[in-house]
Image: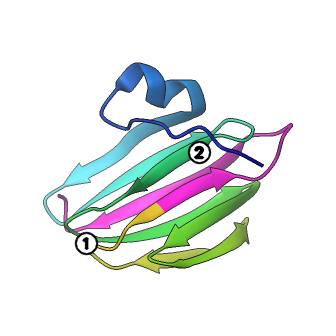
Amino acid sequence: MEYKTIDISDPTELVKAVNPEKIYVKEEGTIVHITLKPEGHLAAHKTPVNVVFFVLEGSIKILVGEEEKVFTANQMIESPANIPHALTNVSSDSIARTLVIKMPSP
């Protein structure tokens, strides 16, 4: 399956496939609730801080560095700072949701 790359710097393009919502922002960390639309894809990118993904709903293929695996509800994975990571909803008919926890806040 071919996924369209979303330019995360373009909010219009980002929201077509992914709906991010910051739900906690403090100096010690940021938590973002992300809803991925069916087959939604967040392109690989790096963050300057450590990130933890906690899947709330659905099946999400998560790329960290060169490793890629599908995670489901109540599973989590860490992505170290400055390592590329990407998210893809592997479902063609349902949303997927994850919490993204960044420590400390970027």
Q: Residue furthest front?
A: 2
Instruction: Say whether residue 47 is left or right of residue 89.
Output: left
Q: Amino acid at mark 1?
A: Asn
Q: Secondary structure at mark 1?
A: loop
Q: Which mark is residue 82?
A: 1
- Are there few (<14), some (14-19), or many (20+) residues within 10 Å of tag 1? some
> Is residue 99 rendered magenta in the image?
yes
Above-or-below relation of 78 to 74: below
Pick the residue in front: 106 or 10: 10
Residue at 30% x, 62% y: name it.
46
Pick the residue in front: 58 or 82: 82
Q: Amino acid at mark 2?
A: His
Residue at 38% x, 44% y: name it.
23
Residue on which disc 2 sits? 41
Q: Which residues are magenta?
A: 86-106
Residue at mark 1 to residue at mark 2: CA–CA distance = 20 Å
Location of residue 3 in the rendering, given as x and y in whole percent from the top left corner:
65, 43
Location of residue 106 in the rendering, given as x and y in whole percent from the top left corner:
17, 58
Location of residue 72 in the rendering, given as x and y in whole percent from the top left corner:
74, 67
Residue at 33% x, 79% y: name it.
80
Instruction: Say whether residue 10 is left or right of residue 29.
Output: right
Q: Secondary structure at mark 2?
A: strand
Q: Residue furthest right?
A: 93
Location of residue 91 in the rendering, given as x and y in whole percent from the top left corner:
81, 47
Instruction: Say whether residue 21 is left or right of residue 28.
Output: right
Q: Earlier in the sequence, mark 1 or mark 2?
A: 2
